[in-house]
Image (tube, helix red, strand yellow):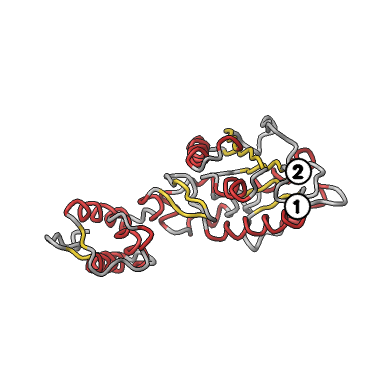
């Protein structure tokens, strides 16, 4: 961070170049993209991060803010935690450590779910959604944003996550259709309000315990390992959810369960426990 020059007039382009150089020297991945995003955030021009105006200069206060951002990124703190929010499938979510940061592949899951629902029923038809392991609320809130007649009950083992997802629901104007509870889905004692549900969605912890040490520093040092580690084979939580499905899914036209798992995990190995016609 000391390599960011403190100048009376530091252009945005020079700031990006200096920050990217610091990141490169520190081995920070995606150095240029991180630099552009942090400079744009420091100057309050986040919508222009891909192409900042050539004549834009950083004030003394903005330079100080950028130096702090760069220091934190060199410490491998994720950009999403540094800036405090992130766009996800047409909504903007607050992001706070240690709650899991929404990933781009989770947006693909939301798209797949919405495509299925569009074929199964009218967009205006009521739909009860259960989001297990909600984190920031990304999946459930993105679905509510796209489905105006839907409601969502969310559950997470982390109090940080339940507070954050509720804050996001309030910020997005969706709190009247969203309820988040603290609970452990692997515990038989957990009682889920508002069921049965037409959709069960989850991005559960799915990383095998032996692989946890191989994760990037941004993940290991900052994100909650309870949202990452799925036990010896990565499927402990997914199995617990599958065991509950016969008791929490309704018989509606969109009735189904959707999981985000690693490609190596074949959830249909668990399907015989659901009976002859599982919808997971």
Work out which residue is located at the far left of the displayed protein and give it.
Answer: 8
Residue name at image x 20 percent, y 56 percent = 63
Image check: 53 left or right of 145?
left
- Counting residues from the N terminus, which is met first, the one under dot 2 or under dot 1? 2
Q: Which mark is residue 104?
A: none
Considering depth in this image, is 208 or 200 the residue closer to the camera?
Answer: 200
Q: CA distance from mark 2 to mark 1?
A: 8 Å
Work out which residue is located at the far front of the displayed protein and give it.
Answer: 124
Work out which residue is located at the far right of the displayed protein and give it.
Answer: 276
Q: Residue 266, how many percent across, how many down?
A: 71, 59
- Quadrant for residue 9, please give it: bottom left
Q: Residue 98, how many percent across, how many down?
A: 44, 44
Residue position marked by numbered label 1 in the rendering: 280
Asked if the residues shown at circle 2 and circle 1 are in contact, with their CB atoms under 8 angstroms apart, the answer is yes
Q: Residue 274, how many percent across, how many down?
A: 81, 47
- Quadrant for residue 268, please give it: bottom right
Residue position marked by numbered label 2 in the rendering: 245
Residue 175's place in the image compared with 256, above or below, is above
Q: Residue 44, how many percent across, how many down?
A: 31, 54
């Amino acid at each position: 961070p000391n390599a960011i020059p403190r100048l009376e007039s530091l252009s945005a382009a020079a700031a990006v170049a200096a920050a990217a150089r610091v990141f490169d020297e520190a081995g920070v991945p995606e150095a240029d993209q991180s630099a552009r995003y942090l400079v744009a955030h420091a100057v309050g021009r986040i919508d222009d991060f891909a192409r900042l105006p050539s004549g834009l200069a950083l004030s003394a206060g903005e330079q100080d803010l950028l130096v702090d951002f760069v220091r934190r990124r060199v410490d491998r703190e994720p950009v999403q935690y540094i800036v405090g929010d992130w766009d996800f499938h047409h909504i903007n979510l607050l992001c706070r450590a240690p709650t899991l940061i929404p990933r781009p592949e989770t947006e693909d899951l939301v798209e797949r779910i919405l495509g299925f629902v569009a074929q199964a029923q009218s967009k205006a038809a009521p739909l009860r959604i259960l989001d297990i392991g909600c984190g920031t609320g990304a999946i459930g809130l993105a679905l509510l944003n796209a489905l105006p007649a839907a409601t969502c009950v969310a559950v997470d083992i982390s109090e940080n996550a339940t507070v954050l997802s509720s804050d996001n629901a309030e910020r997005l104007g969706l709190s009247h259709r969203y309820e988040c509870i603290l609970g452990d889905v692997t515990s038989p004692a957990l009682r889920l309000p508002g069921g049965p549900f037409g959709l069960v969605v989850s991005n559960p912890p799915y990383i095998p315990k032996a692989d946890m040490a191989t994760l990037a520093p941004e993940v290991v040092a900052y994100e909650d390992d309870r949202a990452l580690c799925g036990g010896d084979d990565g499927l402990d939580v997914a199995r617990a959810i599958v065991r509950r499905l016969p008791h929490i899914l309704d018989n509606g036209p969109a009735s189904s369960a959707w999981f985000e798992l690693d490609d190596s995990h074949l959830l249909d190995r668990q399907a015989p426990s659901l009976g002859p016609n599982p919808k997971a």
